[in-house]
Image (cartoon, rainbow, N blue to C red):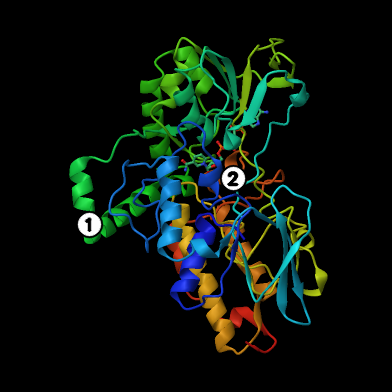
């Protein structure tokens, strides 16, 4: 399920290893996942392109050091085409349920045309991979009276390109990674821009520039690309180092970030308002060299008073001010702890994933949930990264899925299920590894209201690759006898 970067990664891995009866069901009209949906002005990736790309489908050349949304989406499509995945993608198809049958030891996948309540289609599968992402369901701010607003409003991930922002009074709610990219783009167009910030952020420099010609020439050579990727991999792991060691490396990261922010915010009052009040790396560190300068524009105001209600004219803040605007842009992130839900997923004995996740989303290595045989998650619980490339994690997961399926074949079984004690032990290790890290020191989309981090991998990318490289037969219960 899903033909974003996760679905494409797993399909590529399976096809490459001769498991070729693969179908991808995609809710959107085309592949690309988050890069299909997020088309706000300035949408780009803050991970360098040579790392934010598959190791098995390296591009000879990228137009920018940090690619823009259009080029990344094009890359996803190109890769799916080149590897024979595109004809296997069934678009406009929303999966409503996946049900395990204890008798036939297969999954029944029900779906219907996206947006319709018409008849359901049914498919039977030996294994299912849920590659539906962590950041796919836009979240609106929990502000009373949102529907009362009389102007135009939309979410950053569902940008209304038909609405002309030029000369308008615009409010942007939120100052996360999406807002950071879109605010500098729209600020010069709009009449007046009000940016509502609840919490300040730490910033590191990121210049949006075309790939330097000399570097591009060098990186056209495969060996140079491999070396460059390796270098980027290790540089980017420094962010995780800072998060893991807030008293040492984290302090250095904070000093570096503070110097960048001070340079960009010479005005003491604006600096005070924008400054974060939590340790470096607790929330995602934002890579931008143009967001803070955009706040200094004469037509831009940063508001840090809390929004208490939406009125027909615009947001009402706690100081009693109504900010009259024509358009409200919700750059307020995503509902992140629900993963594939509201899809109905029922495993052995008819147990639902909600029951299995009554104490919060959890999965062995973020990939397998005990009691759900031969069901795999891509970008599942505790596999997000604060600094690294998510594509690296997706490739590791794709490899794991393929090896798990091969183990099942080799065992002559119909399916495999991770043992509950293996899942529990892995989860305890993951939880223990968060202790003492910056992630525990503020609230963020990574954490549940009771403070558990269900989104992030607590370590380095390399550790995750090592943990997922070799699924061992003793970790699983093999079920039934293979008939096909
Ligand atoms: P986000 O990081 O969750 O940011 C949401 C923002 O909305 C936060 O600043 C949040 O404030 C604010 N907010 C929520 N409710 C509010 C309210 N009632 N009033 C005022 N502010 C409110 O969402 P996002 O920016 O869409 O990014 C989500 C994730 O997507 C990122 O962390 C990243 O993993 C990914 N992303 C990646 C890139 C990239 O270049 N690789 C680009 C964009 C997004 P608080 O901080 O106080 O909660």
Looking at the image, is mark 1 or mark 2 nearer the viewer? 1
Task: Tell me the distance, in whole angstroms, between the alpha carbons under discs 1 and 2.
Answer: 38 Å
Q: As displayed, is residue 203 above or below residue 447? A: above
Q: As displayed, is residue 452 above or below residue 222? A: above
Residue under the point 45% across and 53% down: 76
Element type at mark 2: helix
469 or 391: nearer the viewer: 391
Mark 2 vs ligand 1: CB below 8 Å: no
For disc 1, the marked residue is 224
For disc 2, the marked residue is 440
* Labels 1 & 2 near each other (Cβ < 8 A): no
Element type at mark 1: helix
Position of residue 321 measured from the top left corner of the image (x, y, whole percent): 68, 10
Residue 346 placement, left or right of 461? right
Q: Which quarter of the picture shows residue 294?
A: top left
Residue under the point 41% across and 20% down: 293
Residue 152 shows up from this direction = yes
């Amino acid at each position: 399920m899903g033909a974003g970067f996760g679905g494409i990664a797993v399909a590529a891995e399976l096809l490459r290893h001769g498991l070729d009866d693969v179908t991808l069901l995609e809710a959107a009209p085309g592949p690309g996942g988050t890069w299909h949906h997020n088309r706000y002005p300035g949408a780009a990736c803050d991970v360098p392109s040579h790392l934010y790309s598959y190791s098995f489908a390296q591009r000879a050349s990228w137009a920018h050091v940090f690619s823009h949304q259009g080029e990344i989406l094009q890359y996803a499509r190109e890769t799916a085409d080149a590897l024979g995945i595109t004809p296997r993608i069934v678009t406009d198809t929303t999966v409503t349920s996946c049900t395990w049958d204890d008798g036939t030891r297969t999954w029944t996948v029900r779906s219907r045309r996206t947006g319709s309540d018409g008849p359901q289609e049914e498919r039977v599968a030996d294994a299912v991979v849920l590659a539906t992402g962590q950041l796919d369901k836009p979240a609106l701010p929990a502000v009373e009276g949102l529907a009362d607003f009389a102007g135009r409003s939309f979410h950053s991930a569902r940008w209304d390109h038909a609405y002309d922002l030029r000369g308008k009074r615009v409010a942007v709610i939120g100052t996360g990674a999406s807002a950071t990219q879109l605010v500098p783009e729209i600020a010069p167009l709009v009449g007046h821009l009000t940016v509502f910030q609840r919490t300040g952020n730490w910033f590191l420099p990121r210049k949006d520039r075309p790939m330097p010609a000399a570097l591009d020439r060098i990186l056209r050579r495969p060996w140079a690309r491999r070396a460059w990727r390796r270098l980027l991999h290790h540089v980017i792991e420094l962010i995780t180092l800072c998060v893991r060691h807030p008293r040492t490396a984290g302090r250095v990261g904070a000093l570096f970030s503070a110097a960048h922010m001070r340079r960009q915010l010479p005005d003491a009052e604006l600096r005070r308002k924008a400054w974060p009040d939590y340790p470096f790396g607790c929330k995602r560190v934002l890579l931008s060299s143009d967001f803070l300068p955009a706040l200094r524009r004469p037509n831009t105001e940063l508001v840090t008073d809390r929004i208490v209600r939406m009125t027909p004219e615009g947001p009402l803040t706690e100081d009693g001010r109504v900010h009259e605007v024509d358009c409200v842009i919700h750059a307020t992130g995503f509902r992140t702890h629900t993963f594939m839900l509201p899809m109905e997923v029922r495993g052995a004995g008819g147990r639902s994933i909600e029951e299995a996740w009554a104490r919060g989303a959890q999965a062995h290595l973020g990939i397998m949930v005990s009691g759900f045989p031969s069901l795999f998650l891509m970008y599942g619980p505790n596999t997000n990264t604060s600094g690294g490339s998510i594509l690296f994690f997706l490739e590791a997961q794709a490899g794991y899925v393929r090896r798990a399926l091969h183990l099942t074949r080799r065992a002559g079984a119909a399916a495999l299920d991770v043992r509950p004690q293996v899942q529990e032990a892995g989860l305890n290790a993951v939880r223990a590894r968060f202790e003492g890290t910056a992630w525990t020191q503020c609230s963020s989309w990574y954490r549940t209201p009771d403070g558990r981090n269900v989104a992030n991998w607590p370590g380095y990318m390399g550790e995750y690759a090592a943990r997922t490289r070799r699924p061992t037969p003793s970790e699983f219960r093999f079920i039934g006898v293979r008939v096909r």
